[in-house]
Image (spheres, rainbow, N blue to C red):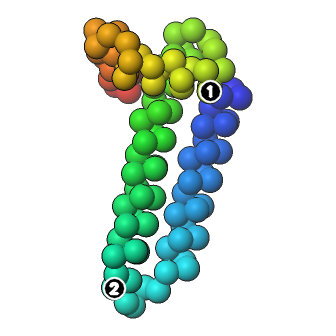
Amino acid sequence: MGSVSFASFMLIFLGILRLIWEALTPQGQDGGCWKKCCDCLCCCCNKLFEWFTTGAFTIINIRATPFCSSGAEAFDLRWFENMGTSSIVAVVQAVRIM
């Protein structure tokens, strides 16, 4: 339950940061390149963390390890270990979502 709570807190924290960013930027103006870059960065961080948490939750379900170590293991499996294991993790995630 702690791992789920931590991940939920982090998602809420990122959402609040994005909400604050949206409130501080002027809505009537275009905002220019900086606003578009910051919006893109916020979106990328959110998507990256969602990708990280899905892998972490999969490893938590398999091995019952804490969130951070599970996330690190999922990241290693996806990027540094063999692609067969990464494919298995992706299949388990797809089955878990259904």
Determine the residue positioned at 52% across, 10% down: 62
Front-lying residue, 51 or 8: 51
- Contact? badges 2 and 1 (CB < 8 Å): no
Front-lying residue, 45 or 94: 45
Report which quarter residue 66 is drawn in. top right
Q: Is residue 4 visible?
A: yes
Quadrant, the N terminus: top right
| Kind of residue at disc 2 | Asp
Tag 2 residue: 30
Q: Secondary structure at mark 1?
A: helix
Classify mark 1: residues with Cα within 10 Å, few (<14), some (14-19) or many (20+). some
Q: Position of residue 78 (x, y in %)?
A: 37, 21
Determine the residue positioned at 50% across, 73% down: 22
Report which quarter residue 23 is drawn in. bottom right
Tag 1 residue: 68
Quadrant, the C terminus: top left
Determine the residue positioned at 49% across, 81% down: 25
Sequence-first tag of 2 and 1: 2
| Kind of residue at disc 1 | Cys
Residues at marks 2 and 1, CA–CA distance in whole angstroms: 39 Å
Front-lying residue, 79 or 27: 79
Is residue 94 depicted above or below 16 in this figure?
A: above
